[in-house]
Amino acid sequence: MNPVDRLIKATHNASFELQEASDSVIKKALLRIASLLDENSAAVLKANQKDLQRQDPNDPKNDRLLLNEARVASIAAAIRNIASLPCPAGKIIEEKTLANGLKLQKRTAPLGVVGAIYESRPNVTFDIAALSLRSKNACVLKGSRDAEETNKISVSLIQKALKENGLPPQCVSLLPSNREVLDQLFTATRFVDVIIPRGSAGLIQHVRKNSLVPTIETGAGVCHIYVEKEADLQKAANIVVNAKVSRPSVCNAVDTVLLDKEIAPAFFEKTLPQFEQHGVEIYAEPKAYAVLKGYPFLKKATKESFGQEYLSLKCSVKLVNGIDEALAHIREFSTRHSEAIVSKNKKHCARFINQVDAAVVYTNASTRFTDGEEFGLGAEIGISTQKLHARGPFALEKLVTEKWIAQGNGQTR
């Protein structure tokens, strides 16, 4: 057995000991992870700088990789919050006694071993580890080369906390960062129960096509905001600007603005000064391009400009003839992540809610709220865009499956 297979098997074996651990021990381990992160923040930031120094300094996606004191403190706070949440495993969902006296009980149970594949974002290492431990799941983490140094020191702190609290350090394992190990993870059907990819559309598709282990998709978000002709234009401008510039490198940032053509000039009058201030590039189809002439960061849209997750200060704009055309565009290009309508027309808002197929649908609000912590669920593993098992912010409550318990007294059939 090669080293990667041994590591995965060791995590599988550790998962059984974790499932026997008391709630108080797991809480103590999580709180210790948070305190170790606080105590070693300087070392973590130093490792993060090594990772950043290998990147192109002009790459807008560096924001995903960057850690600073505020972000480290936020990660530690999120871990403490997870420790305070109830464990979702072991809850009784249903119970009954059959006519023959057999007692049946359906309980929630840990998934077992969670495999996570993700790009950049070193905070994800702590989020997934903490959520997995709180739900009594072991985890195998596969980060990217971009965050290799940060991930190594992060997992070393997590394993130190586990060992100090009498839990196997192998409950949280880090695979080598090279891409070649993915094939070993994809075929580890005896030892890994589910794989959760978090990252680009390319990464997610690669996992879907190649993994023999069941997969829950999270990540890629091509998000739209439709500004309907009856929108409050000041609110619409504030929503669109927030959804684009507040943190453009994340999956809930808006990528395409759909706009009823009759309100385009008035909407752009309120929006463009803020876009220009932040240097937002606009890729506009011909009708929108004609209205936007004079904007300094204007480009002509191509077919590829729509249905693209920009992850930067870029967005596409299209003028539409009403809600029918807007809905048709979203159906064609959406990744079913987060979609929004801005309108005072309650009928159109209700139709948008009913007809748009997405994990989260908004009326008169920014798409940037699609987040486990914002929804009051604690940290998240990602945003699930599929329909089986979990959809939307994939947080603690969904890291379980079900198990039937049948207690008898000699019954036979």
Image: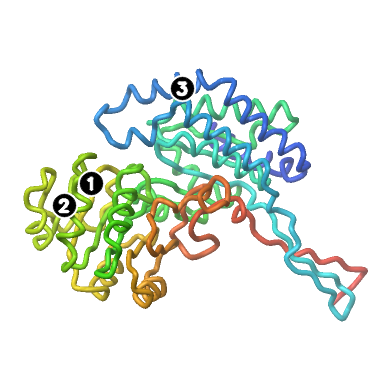
Q: Nearer the viewer, residue 192 or 35?
A: 35
Specify the amino acid type for callout 2: Tyr
Q: Position of residue 100 (x, y in %)?
A: 88, 79
Judged left or right of residue 319, residue 95 is right
Q: Mark 3 highlights which residue?
A: 45
Cα distance in 3D space between marks 3 and 2: 36 Å
Disc marking residue 283? 2
Q: Earlier in the sequence, mark 1 or mark 2?
A: 2
265 with respect to 44 (left or right) = left
Residue underneath mark 1:
314
- As helix, strand or loop, the secondary structure at mark 2 comes to strand
Looking at this view, is 314 or 187 the one in front? Answer: 314
Determine the image quadrant of residue 67: top left
Residue 217 in the image: x percent, y percent?
A: 45, 55
Residue type at numbered disc 3: Leu
Which residue is at 75% across, 69% downward?
94
Q: Is 366 above or below relative to 144?
A: below
Percent of width and height locating residue 355: 37, 74
On the rendered image, what quadrant is the N terminus found in?
Answer: top right
Q: At which x and y percent is residue 60?
A: 28, 36
Q: Nearer the viewer, residue 244 or 180?
A: 244
When the figure is inspected, residue 74 is found, relative to residue 377, above or below; the finding is above
Q: Residues within 10 Å of mark 1 (few under 14, many from 20)?
A: many
